[in-house]
Image (tube, rainbow, N blue to C red):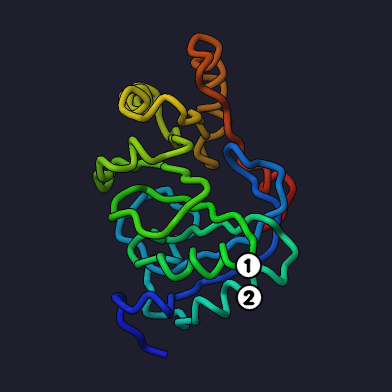
Amino acid sequence: MKRERSDPSFLPVMESFHTIQGEGYHTGKSAFFLRLGGCDVGCHWCDVKESWDASQFDWVSVKQLADDAKESGAEIAVITGGEPLMYDLSELTFEISKRGMQNNIETSGAYNLTGTWDWICFSPKKFKKPREEFYSESDELKVIVYNRSDLKWAKEHAEKVNSKSKLFLQPEWSKSDEMSPLIVEFVKKNPRWQISLQTHKYLNIP
């Protein structure tokens, strides 16, 4: 069904599934993932480029999405993409919260923050400048390391985020063998940072 982006009661859904959170602060926890279609950030190393074109996905009511999340048995709902904040997520987070679940989001911060969140994973990208509000609102800063210069870039963002925000460096999957030793040495010298690995890929789960 074709919908307007301004209608927060329906969202374009690429996929949804119950799995184990594989990255960042909540690694290892049972979570219901809701992947929205649509992204214009344009990361050339993105591993879900099939999510970029929202026009190919069905628009689903947020009440149905929240029901699906609740029925999964998970306590955490993770809203991701694509870039989920291309859409107004206020009604979605309301419906999920009403069902007693925790609302987590993974975002590049390129769009205005909408919705009420229990956890904001802010993962800025060089390809589209993030909005300033995410530096104060984020609970987690997760920087993907594709080359050595990303370590310097990560430090620049860390200087801007709030003091409670957890800091994570994650090697881009295809460059993991090359970047992981650099990240290890960086974290040893900068102990506020932690390493995030895509453990779901090692476990061969979604």
> Would you call the spot at circle 2 few (<14 residues within 10 Å), some (14-19), or many (20 or more)?
some
Q: Is residue 111 left or right of residue 25?
A: left
Q: Amino acid type of disc 1?
A: Arg
Image quadrant where one finds the C terminus:
bottom right
- Residue at label 1? 99
Q: Amino acid type of disc 2?
A: Asp
Name the quadrant containing residue 83. bottom left
Across and down, in percent, residue 60 comes to: 49, 81
Q: Is residue 178 left or right of residue 150?
A: right
Secondary structure at numbered mark 2? helix
Image quadrant where one finds the N terminus:
bottom left
Task: Identify the residue at image location x=30%, y=82%.
Answer: 4
Task: Identify the residue at image location x=52%, y=34%.
Answer: 170
Residue at the far bottom in the pictured view: 1
**Mark number, residue 61:** none
> Would you call the spot at circle 1 few (<14 residues within 10 Å), some (14-19), or many (20 or more)?
some
